[in-house]
Amino acid sequence: MSDERTAPEGDLAEPFLLAVLASGGLDAEYVRAEGNTLYRRGEDGEEIPVLDYVGGYGSLMLGHSNPEIIAYAKTLLDQRTPVHAQFSRHPYAGDVAAALNRIIQRERGDDEQYYAIFANSGAEAVEAAMKHAELDRGLRVTELTEEIAGHIDDVREQVAAGAATVPAHVADSIDDLVAEVRTRNEAQSARPPLFLTPEGAFHGKLAGSVQLTHNEGYRLPFKALAAQARFVPRDQPGALRKIIDEERGHLLDLVVEGGRVRVVERDAPLFTAFVLEPVQGEGGIHELSREFTQEVQQVCAEHGIPVVVDEIQSGMGRTGTFLAATHLGLRGDYYTLAKSLGGGIAKAAVTLVRKPLYRGQFELAHSSTFAKDSFSCLIALKVLEIMEADDGEVYRRAAERGERLLAMLRAVRADFPGVVSDVRGRGLMLGLEFHDQSAADAQPLRQVAGSGFFGYFVAGHILRTHRIRVFPTSSAVNTLRFEPSVYLTDGEIDRLEAALRDVCAIIRDTDGQALAPVA
């Protein structure tokens, strides 16, 4: 798509994006929403229903305008619940934290406790995790350097008292040795921190979180703004250890053994955290393997690197368990939750920090105007109540509906093997990937594929022809995502199947003109 596209005359709200949507036929205005349906206005003013498989990018686990949540929200607003009462007691936030702890403890089968830091969005929750982990790393560096400084003073005293000597091959004098050690340690302590994250990762687009996003188009323009990440291959055992060995640093310490001064190396905390999604959303709906996550867990534990599990899109029951990490046996030092936590109407997010790692001073160094308010917290509690009702019926239904949807997608792939390359995901977080058509014989299809927006043009056709809303993942535009609510019906699955079979037939049997940009 060309940067020359223009938005409708006078439109000042992100006009370039609006022009991109218009070129793909995706610039619909929706006026009402319920369940898995959005409504747009027709030319004569009538409402036109559109089946929504985008689901607010995973924010609508309980559907648009969930009646129980809407009724509760009206009650809260009628009661004039205080949204802005910052720097006061917030018992409802404590209730959310307690409820999340109970759910996670039940699912993991342990009694590990987590403190909660509240936010407004998933990206902000990731930023909070990054900041807290970096505060912790910085404090650990300070503690280590202070410990080494104490050792140096002690060694100096022993040398001055004649109780220890500096071997000639180590240094000419204790003063020279101390100067060398301090110079080396100052240089090591000044090294910028690094994050670790898998290839294909996406964790938001804020100044810090975007550095954890593998897609260079999002990350590189802002590289100078925040700490950098090393991206770990998902399919190469041992790659994580190799990266850590390449980057790890040491501080020098002094000890006295047998009356002689020795220089020893101490591991310097360089890596702030390993941040990962159990199911990579924007990277193309890739569930991490159990082998990979077990290696991450083991290696990070060995090196004292905390693991941040980003459950913003995959959590809240979407994969059939409250946490997608449960399927992998993965236990986080941090968890981030958002999207469906707000029930489709509130902006609610939370960062959970394992109790032994928590630094209380973070609460004074980090804050958020709209976080931890009564409205979003009470809505979050209602969401958790619905999900836990009937012994977790929502989780069981997500798994069952997901299996039904996945079976349909696999059937489409089986019938169109030259068009669909893969179907993957878990529960109600699924993806269908098309083969690259950039070398297709038909020029229109080749042009659409070469635009870099293939999935959006496919989505535009499905919307115009079938009144179904789908989108590709942002960093893998040949992959359509499907994240409907848990109330998905068989009829809605059948409608999607018809639409996918239609578009696959267009790709297989025609020149692809039907997918071309809207004039």
Image: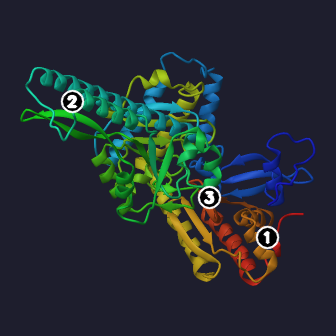
Hey, what amino acid is under mark 1? Leu
Q: Which mark is residue 515?
A: 1
Position of residue 196 in the picture relative to residue 151 (left or right): right
Say how the picture is coloured. Answer: rainbow
- Mark 3, secondary structure of its residue: loop
The local crowd at label 3, few if under 14, some if 14 to 19, many if 20 or more residues have their Cα within 10 Å, is many
Q: Position of residue 371 (x, y in %)?
A: 56, 28
Q: Nearer the viewer, mark 1 or mark 3?
A: 3
| Cα distance between the residues tagged 2 and 1 | 77 Å
Residue 293 can be seen in this image: no
Residue that extends furthest to the top in the rendered view of this protein: 88
| Cα distance between the residues tagged 1 and 3 | 20 Å
Q: Nearer the viewer, residue 183 or 143?
A: 183
Position of residue 349 in the picture relative to residue 157 (left or right): right
Quarter of image, res 445: bottom right
Q: Position of residue 403 (x, y in %)?
A: 50, 66
Q: Nearer the viewer, residue 507 or 146?
A: 146
